Image (spheres, helix red, strand yellow):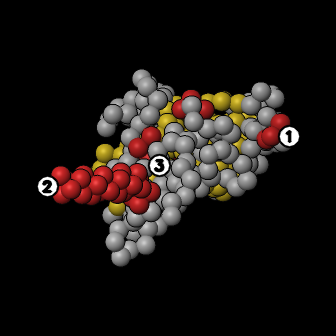
Amino acid sequence: MLDHFRDFRALLAIDLRRATMIFAALPFLLAGSSGCIGVSAKATGPAVPGAVSAVKKCRAVRPADDGSIDDLEDANNQIVKTAGRDGYWWNAADPKGSKIEMQVIEPGAGGSELAMHMTGTTVPGKPEDDFWGVQLGISFVSDGLFYDASKYAGVAFKAKVGTPNSARAIRFKMADINTHKDAGICTACWNHFGKDISLTPEWKEYRVTFSGAEQEPGWGDPRPQAITPSKLIALNWQVGPGQTYDIWIDDVTFLDCE
């Protein structure tokens, strides 16, 4: 009887050692089998600072039902107060002496009464040396920083040049959490997602979808794959260095899918 008990204790000790070895190896076994059974796990790229939300894509777009950002018909610098938006128009110039004046005056696009008019000159120089020109802009909210535009597909506006010698090349940009300095993420800021646009002397509508907007090549940190519509901060129209400009903007609105 005593011999049988000794044999049982020896077998139990062996089983306990085996169990300890299995539990010690368990994290490594799980790490090697993180994909689904029968399906190869896809490798993920490096994480981009700041959340990149899903971007709404459409085959065709139209002005959103509640998308009006501003039509300027109230003759002030505040945008239309709707859908959580209550921000203001603003302007900025580089520290090298570029000038900008903005005012809401007649006439507007398509027979409307009023539009935003921006005029001035920009100093020649290299953007990397702080000769970046001027910007006309819109902030979406007056309190806080971010605006959630994830239900929309992009932004449209009407624009034209007012004089034959005006600069026609501008860049339309949409600032978000990854590109605006105030969000605290970017280390090389201000390379907002947008589109280069060439204006004409006649009023024309320009549509820039979130899925089609891009950063300028060669600079900016981070460089996420897409804009983050759920964390938008501002819109702006930029005129580069060494230009004389006379530009009109009207009927700014969000877009939705048709």
Check disc 2 and give the amino acid type.
Answer: Met
Pick the residue in front: 184 or 144. 184
Q: Is residue 27 above or below residue 116?
A: below
Q: Nearer the viewer, mark 1 or mark 3?
A: 3
Circle 2 SS class: loop
Pick the residue in front: 19 or 120. 19
Residue at 38% x, 48% y: name it: 150
Q: Which residue is mark 2?
A: 1
Q: Which residue is mark 3?
A: 52
Q: Total marks drawn? A: 3
90 left or right of 140? right
Are the two marked residues, 1 and 2, in contact with CB atoms closer than 8 angstroms? no
Circle 3 SS class: loop
Q: Is residue 82 above or below residue 41?
A: above
Whole-percent x, y for residue 144 in the image: 43, 25
Q: Is residue 212 above or below residue 155?
A: below
Quadrant containing the N terminus in the rendered view: bottom left
Please tell me how crowded label 3 is: few (under 14), some (14-19), or many (20+) other residues with Cα within 10 Å. some
Q: Which residue is mark 1?
A: 125
Whole-percent x, y for residue 206 in the image: 53, 56
Q: Nearer the viewer, mark 1 or mark 2?
A: 2
